Image (spheres, coloured by chain):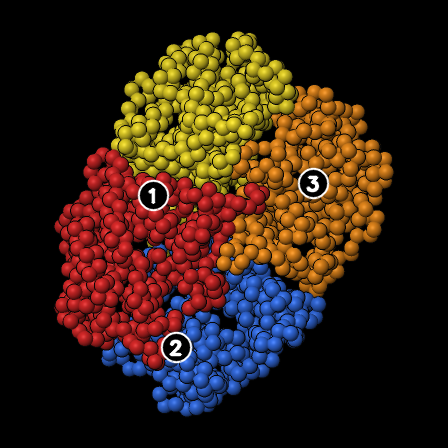
Chain colours: A red, B blue, C orange, D yellow
Amino acid sequence: MPHSTTAPTLGVGMVGYAFMGAAHSQGWRTVARAFDLPLTPVMAAVCGRDPEAVAAAAGRLGWAAAETDWRALIAREDVQLVDICTPGDSHAEIAIAALEAGKHVLCEKPLANNEAEAQAMVEAARAARDRGQVAMVGFNYRRVPALAHARRLIAEGRLGSLRHLRATYLQDWGTDPAGPLVWRMRKEKAGSGALGDLGAHVVDLAQYLTGEPITGVSAQVETFIRRRPLPGDPERTGEVTVDDAALFTGRLASGALASFEVSRLAAGRKNALTIEVNGAEGSLSFDLERLNELEFHDHTLPAAEAGFRRILVTEPDHPYLEGWWPPGHGLGYEHTFTHQARDLVRAIAEGGRPAPGFAEGLQVQRVLAAVEESARNDSVFTPVPLPARDEQGE
Amino acid sequence: MPHSTTAPTLGVGMVGYAFMGAAHSQGWRTVARAFDLPLTPVMAAVCGRDPEAVAAAAGRLGWAAAETDWRALIAREDVQLVDICTPGDSHAEIAIAALEAGKHVLCEKPLANNEAEAQAMVEAARAARDRGQVAMVGFNYRRVPALAHARRLIAEGRLGSLRHLRATYLQDWGTDPAGPLVWRMRKEKAGSGALGDLGAHVVDLAQYLTGEPITGVSAQVETFIRRRPLPGDPERTGEVTVDDAALFTGRLASGALASFEVSRLAAGRKNALTIEVNGAEGSLSFDLERLNELEFHDHTLPAAEAGFRRILVTEPDHPYLEGWWPPGHGLGYEHTFTHQARDLVRAIAEGGRPAPGFAEGLQVQRVLAAVEESARNDSVFTPVPLPARDEQGE
Amino acid sequence: MPHSTTAPTLGVGMVGYAFMGAAHSQGWRTVARAFDLPLTPVMAAVCGRDPEAVAAAAGRLGWAAAETDWRALIAREDVQLVDICTPGDSHAEIAIAALEAGKHVLCEKPLANNEAEAQAMVEAARAARDRGQVAMVGFNYRRVPALAHARRLIAEGRLGSLRHLRATYLQDWGTDPAGPLVWRMRKEKAGSGALGDLGAHVVDLAQYLTGEPITGVSAQVETFIRRRPLPGDPERTGEVTVDDAALFTGRLASGALASFEVSRLAAGRKNALTIEVNGAEGSLSFDLERLNELEFHDHTLPAAEAGFRRILVTEPDHPYLEGWWPPGHGLGYEHTFTHQARDLVRAIAEGGRPAPGFAEGLQVQRVLAAVEESARNDSVFTPVPLPARDEQGE
Amino acid sequence: MPHSTTAPTLGVGMVGYAFMGAAHSQGWRTVARAFDLPLTPVMAAVCGRDPEAVAAAAGRLGWAAAETDWRALIAREDVQLVDICTPGDSHAEIAIAALEAGKHVLCEKPLANNEAEAQAMVEAARAARDRGQVAMVGFNYRRVPALAHARRLIAEGRLGSLRHLRATYLQDWGTDPAGPLVWRMRKEKAGSGALGDLGAHVVDLAQYLTGEPITGVSAQVETFIRRRPLPGDPERTGEVTVDDAALFTGRLASGALASFEVSRLAAGRKNALTIEVNGAEGSLSFDLERLNELEFHDHTLPAAEAGFRRILVTEPDHPYLEGWWPPGHGLGYEHTFTHQARDLVRAIAEGGRPAPGFAEGLQVQRVLAAVEESARNDSVFTPVPLPARDEQGE
């Protein structure tokens, strides 16, 4: 039953039903219960290659139908939005086909596994935009209320001129060398390792929070554990063809210094996306392991009473909080997908251009490509091509 | 669509649709998506007195039908479980009627506004149990994974003999004297103030975590702000007839010392349910404002390397985590209701006796009654009657 | 060599040279190096009963001479100030004799082991004051810069009307039952256990920070481990005749609620003197284990940007910081004794009345006596006699 | 009076009496009171150019005599150890002269303002060593107990193979553009800015903690504020000729990735020397703003009970703690200088070779030089020459 029985519906078809598919499903399931929406999403169909598995997933996750061919999913009349939750190697093909078929598209990050594919997706999105379609990349962490609030504070000038940004995204599931060679460790599927999986998030957030592009990088990448047991055949090992960790410094357009570190081998750090920004008039600090908190230092206060203050980002006038609980009753990881769904549905209804669009996804891709190029070239500072005007317009 | 299309259904009817109703709805909506269940809950009908408002709530929260008379809700054939989310003054009447009508019951805490009502509810629940019905009180915080894990550690003896328990539940929404006289500040509706609203939770958790009843208390209660503007008529004021804060010490059955403080006027504390337990071999510490974390000190380690360790309670073998996300991807407040629904549905299917049953709710009520009695009697230590054997059996 | 070679000297004689004696020595040794003083303290002589041990202590701690009879120490011409660092059972006798001999006195807390002795000391101090002598109690934690700053903020009204104060002082050195029966566990030496040792500090701080006396208490005390091995004869055990822990609630004169807990058996808490004060316009929170920090919540800020802020109390205009290092270069426990020495020396030079005077020490004693009385009387709320006018004047 | 009246003395002569001089004085003043020493330091003389100011400093800091020519100080018969606390431009000249005059030397970091000077100092130290003299660099943070304990844990293999090290040293005193052009902002005095001042510390600590040299770096440096008011003439401005901030990545000899960031413009960070090390079996994390704490994650524990644990490094068997207070009674910044004095005095007495020797100081200098070279060369990865065998021997 819709949030408002009079709102028209928006049929959603999702491709992929693993971790990301489950998270997106939770978003679609809850968004119209938490927020007033001009369109009511309907979970029309989910798509996967294994008929039994996808049927079970449809039942478990609450999709009305199951498909085994993504082309059939795109072709369904009850699907107006295609939500792509597959590994990065199939993003371009599915997204371009969906856009050409007149559907709106939500595509998980990273936009694509290489810049050429990402460029083609941007072009398809631009053409589709002229037909009234929307294309969005799933950088869900922009929808953590604390980070949306951080962007707002920076945009209001509360930090003054920016000097420093430092970000990490540290996990530790790769620490054990006996861990299997999953698809996220194979270049042909994942494009890259920690860099694309985790680095894409922090690069996007750096640009999102500051409103500034990254203009160049100097990088090192490393694969500490080069062979791992094959899944399902632990006696044999296969080669890890992506990075375990990447370390890079960069510059924002304003000249601020930026540093980034991502790893799957940081023992004890489970999901430590941390980001700090220092400006002439204040600083902000965030840690995804405490996602309901934002630390804010107001440097314009007298020194004797200044300090990082822990804002619980659960107040009614914090971003996205109008849909949830009283102050102090925290949200979790999955709410970012509900918020993403909210913003996307509203953009579709209003004919807007939801951020991040594909051009922003491409720009992240260019930063990641520059990281890899710098790492291949003795860490030499490698400029990142800035978006052309029409890309910016996307 | 059910989690497993072959699972039989369990029709749920909910009374009340404000804060608690919204939270319970989120639990019913998501439980079968996150967990394997032997029965699939169906959100059959919601009940409220205002026809328009309840119809809107049904649409917004996803209930298939709306009722304006709770007796009609109970009588519905498609309702097998009655979920009571109203203020405490109506709990007894609705719950007893539902049990007598052969329905399972989930009743929000506190069980009732006084001990006599709570006692009648326990008796109704006992009679119903012989007919195979289930009655549960909604102490949802037992289902915070960190607290469920804490109980497990204590039960395993990791803390040794218990010496101290200290708990607070501090909020600050009552700090401003211009805040309106809401129903939670009126004795006839709410029974008591911070004591019943917040104190019930920490009393229940103290007994749940340690597995020991509170045997007596010494208490002070206070109403700092005695008159407040009437809602809808801010020119006039009315009397606050409940406490703003309560402070009490007590004993656990083992002789451990316990302290409790609850308040609505603790500026800056938004939802600070904190609880620490010290034993001869270890200690635990928790803060609901960081609900994905549990601090554990293992006192059996060498002193030079011992310390409170911050366990992110998001690992696959932590309680309830099998249904959710990878390590470090935190949960929120509302997940406690999903977990509560899981445990309740399983108990109904298996003919079990879900904890906390009504007798446990009554026991909490007795502690709160002893707090009020002690506060009236110059804080003298006031014993809490322990449950009779058959109550314990409930 | 004195700080200023032209400043006259102040001869100090110290009784006792164990833990407190070593800490006071560090204060006397460093105070004229860190602060401008009108009198330069000279470490004239230290006193203890064992001739060899006291001579060694004199050498190690830097005292110019050693005495084995405290009466001889008091009689020395080069001693103008007697610093009493012995257990509480000898405080009254030494302090009264020193005052009668015309010496200034610094006496470690608690002032005495019972109220009668404390009362006699107050009278001696009052008589001595008329002769220009100074008497001070060693509540050194008042001189933690963060706590001195907290008092300042409260006195300036930054917290508005006070509602709550909660304080703990938790240690864990008593956790192990095999720990020996030291003098701090014997009533005849120590007066009481955690209550006098730790409780005296938090009671004093509660009154110091708020500027309000405690008007009554309701208490429980407990001795968890009743027999312990004798020091030097671990085969035999002796009786613990003091409390391990005390738990009490109280009221401040303004009506604010206060809670206190002290223990030597809180596993993992090493020196956890925590104190939080909530008012209508703000809150403060402190933990001695992080003594360079003060948490301040300004409730007058908009809710969306309010939160507890961590002030590093190391700025030049924080109390006592003019003598030390640049911002962020933290101080330690022992600095409280240097600060105490500074304030005492200045008071002597200026003929002032250093706080806390003996009357304040007596008032703390009365609170502790009321705690013990309440604990004996089923925790009944027990008023604390307020100071007479002339005591207040001390 | 010495700690042990029978211990021979060690005459100390100090050059410079500003911030570092005051800190070293506190070390010399207290070391024999806290620790058993084979030699008792005597604060013989302090040296500075301004006769009045140095005389005042001698009085204030407790030095027996004052000199205005460092050559005269070195020549004094009562000086056996020369302690150099001047800006880096005079280190080489004073240190070499002192060593050639047969004196032991303690030299503040950075060892020198350029590699050539540092190399000459190493040679002088090597020659002096053959004559039984000792030369040590003042990297005082090695003597923070938590960091000494961290080194011990790593050396014991508790972290397994190292993967990552990340370190920052962030201050904010340069944030305000109206701040004056102090000597630390002029290349001819200070050599470099944040890099030499703060970077030297984190580079030394990275090598100290891991026991591995840094083999190469990729760097950016920046001067955000290029002109500042002249001290004493605020109407006019002068050029800032050193960096405000430096950002570099590197490799340890084992292949572990390392990142470093130092800044004087990180608003709100007062003295944030943070360092984290991740290995295959555990991780450590430290923050100088909470210098009594070390966070340790033991990755060999079951995941459900693992987490970063906060060790209060105040136990009797933690490094340096035998001289101080009971557990939980924290130390401060200045204690590092007392510990440094302890280790140096013992090395002199025992004819040992105290770490860090001048060769270690040179190696830090080489890393800093490589940072500057990389920054000049588009951040290209720049190898750091490893110490020759005989340098290692120093």
Q: Which residue is mark 2?
A: B60
Q: Is residue C246 visible?
A: no
Residue C178 in picture, x, y percent from top left: 54, 47
Quarter of image, res B68: bottom left
- The Cα–Cα distance between marks 1 and 3, rounded to whole angstroms, is 58 Å
Label 3 in the same subunit as label 2: no
**Subunit under mark 2:** B
Q: Nearer the viewer, mark 2 or mark 1?
A: 1
Task: Select label 1 or label 3 by which is in front.
Answer: 1
In this view, B371 is above or below C244: below
Q: Residue at x 28, y 55 (%)?
A: A393
Q: Which residue is mark 3?
A: C138
Labelled disc at residue A253: 1
| Mark 1 and mark 3 residues within 8 Å of each other at the beta carbon | no
The three-letter code of the residue at mark 2 reads Arg
Q: Please say if the residues under marks 2 and 1 sit with CB atoms less than 8 Å apart.
A: no
Q: Name the subunit of mark 1.
A: A
**The one of D148 and D139 positioned closer to us in this rendering:** D139
Task: Provide residue B161's location: percent of width, then percent of height.
Answer: 51, 58
